[in-house]
Amino acid sequence: MSERIAKVNRKTRETDIEMVLNLDGKGAANINTGVGFFDHMLDGFSRHGFFDLQLKVKGDLEVDDHHTIEDTGIVLGTAIKEAIADKKGIKRYGSTIIPMDETMIMCAIDLCGRPYLSMNEAFLANKVGDMETTMVREFFYAISYSAGMNIHIKILDGHNAHHIIEAIFKSFARALDEATSIDPRITDVLSTKGSLS
């Protein structure tokens, strides 16, 4: 199997992002976005999905964290799309339920080529650390559109915003790991149309 690694650079007047993503890694991460809690969440994503992730972001944090987090989602989605390439042999679907103390999160994804995000977020806090909780939806929306994937995230239980967000990132990682996994029974793409684009 060829390496499933993507290198993506994106530079605008608001952000300058460099990312290397290895879908078949061991969960090693080197992350610096300038938003501490977001770094912590991305480290959990890397570790629990067994993705190697190198990420360096310079964003306009003097404004707020919006562009930094949203643009990172765009770049991560692009990297996922590039790393899975023609999608031959992948399972396509992934789902998981993650508990974290009082919290229970379900995430299901489909690497179908069509973007869609369904998420029932309701955070009791406006911020966790230095990250706005409204940016959780923006981040996953950006991933869904740049990667071309369906993402369904459901908060089944929980009230602590830190626990909820952390479980969301971990559940997404595990669902993505499953969906991008190679199944030797799948010799082409898993679609009756013969295409996942």
Image (spheres, helix red, strand yellow):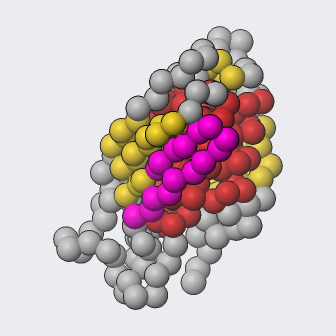
Q: Based on the displayed image, in which of its 4 quarters is residue 56 positioned?
A: top right
Q: In this view, does 185 lie to the left or right of 63?
A: left
Q: Which residue lies furthest to the top in this view?
A: 63
Q: Based on the displayed image, in which of its 4 quarters is residue 193 positioned?
A: bottom left
Q: In this view, does 91 lie above or below 19?
A: below
* Observer able to see residue 121: yes
Q: In this view, does 93 lie to the left or right of 59?
A: left
Residue beneath the point at 47% across and 48% down = 106
Q: In this view, does 70 lie above or below 25?
A: above
Our reading of the magenta stretch's main secondary structure is strand
Residue beneath the point at 62% across and 74% down = 3
Residue beneath the point at 65% across and 44% down = 100
Q: Based on the displayed image, in which of its 4 quarters is residue 91 positioned?
A: bottom left
Q: Residue 6: x percent and y percent?
A: 60, 60
Total tally of numbered discs in the picture? 0
**Residue 99 among those drawn in magenta:** yes
Q: In what quadrant of the picture does the N terminus appear?
A: bottom right
**Residue 188 among those drawn in magenta:** no
Q: In what quadrant of the picture does the C terminus appear?
A: bottom left
* Observer able to see residue 11: no
Residue sitting nearer the eye, 24 or 146: 24
Q: Residue 38: x percent and y percent?
A: 69, 33
Q: Is residue 89 above or below residue 139?
A: below
Residue sitting nearer the eye, 99 or 27: 99
Q: Residue 89: x percent and y percent?
A: 42, 79
Residue beneath the point at 50% across and 57% down = 96
**Numbered range of the magenta stretch:** 93-107
Q: Residue furthest left?
A: 193
